Image (spheres, rainbow, N blue to C red):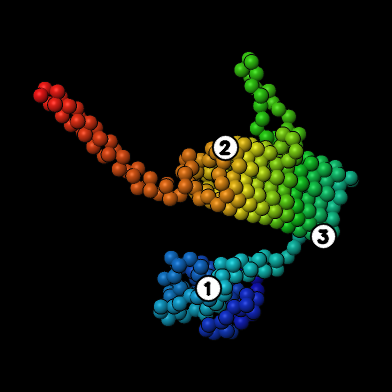
Amino acid sequence: MQISFTATQIAQVLNGIVEGDPSVSVNDFSKIEEGKTGSLTFLANPKYTHHIYSTDASIVLVNKDFVAEQPIKATLIRCENAYAALAILLDLVEKSKPQKTGVEAMSFIAESAEVGENVYVGAFSYVSDKAKIGNNSKIYPQVFIGDNVVVGDNTIIYPGVKIYAGCKVGSNCILHSGVVVGSDGFGFAPQENGEYKKIPQLGIVIIEDDVEIGANTTIDRAVMDATIIRKGVKLDNLIQVAHNVEIGSNTVMAAQVGISGSTKIGQSCVLGGQIGLGGHITIGDNVSIGAQAGIISNIKSGAQIIGSPAIPVKDFFRSSVIFPKLPDMYKQISQLQKEIEALKKEVEKK
């Protein structure tokens, strides 16, 4: 935090209620367990509640319904949602930082490219023929923007991003370092001699508004038409999105998800880390998938699944209780089989 704010000023921004010293000020953020004087922290997860009684942070954001069981030396600001309130403050601090503008030396912008107002283009970036860059967007150093690429307003493209020809990125997007948009989809036709012939990938990638894409995530261009990332999607680092995939609006994914070609994912889905989705399947809206799940078939809207192959969450947890017992159960069954065979022989003798 670059400047100092009092509890009263923060509460006004958040529509919160101050409980404690309204004049106390902060100029930094901290985790509640590592809080220090002059910093602001928050309490949203109940398992961290015990830290609020010992933290040295000067101000703590808490939910309105928080009930203290011991005295608290910090000043509290009660909010509807402490975590959301923290996000608002962090966003304000981020926007208060000096903003880069202008075109740095050693960058290249083609004559046929269109660059909007208040745009920043960093050194060693390359903006190709007929590309369009919207107002207030930031192209950091070593970014490649291909022919006919369109980038909307207020979009941030961090160092090392590559956007291949014809792809479209909306407004208010953030692409972190190492993102590749529009690389060829993994398409090869097997030949009679055992070799594979490359299938040209002639489509594009369309990224709608308000999308954030984490570092080193790759989004392949379509064979034909477009791979589409809908409005409000948030992708973590190291995600692979294959050709002709469509991800519905406001869906979020953790790191190392792999999505095979032509799979459709609905709106407002939540995918944990290291999930693998097979090709040509459809995931409905509001689906939650646990980490490391393997998805090989269609999933209906509203489902909660986990496992590989994935099954409903309740079934998975019931099964997980049984897994450690399987070796003993196998021994018991084997022993029962032996006893049954022995009984059969006794009966036959009689």
* Disc on the earlier residue, 2 or 3: 3
Q: Residue furthest front?
A: 350
Image coordinates of residue 236 in percent, x first then y, are 60, 50
Q: Secondary structure at mark 2?
A: loop
Image coordinates of residue 132 in percent, x first then y, are 83, 49
Answer above or below: position of 17 versus 231: below
Asked whether 56 or 319 is in front, the reply is 319
The amino acid beneath tag 3 is Asn
* Residue 123 seen anywhere in this rendered image of the structure: no
* Disc on the earlier residue, 2 or 1: 1
Image coordinates of residue 120 in percent, x first then y, are 79, 56
The amino acid beneath tag 2 is Gly
Asked which quadrant contains residue 296, the reply is: top right
- Alpha carbon separation for disc pair 1 and 3: 39 Å
The amino acid beneath tag 1 is Asn
The total number of labels drawn is: 3
Q: Secondary structure at mark 1?
A: strand
* Disc on the earlier residue, 1 or 3: 1
Residue depicted at 56% across the width and 67% down the height = 83
Q: Nearer the viewer, mark 1 or mark 3?
A: 1
Q: Determine crowd level at label 2: few under 14, some 14-19, many 20+ residues with C-alpha closer than 10 A.
A: some
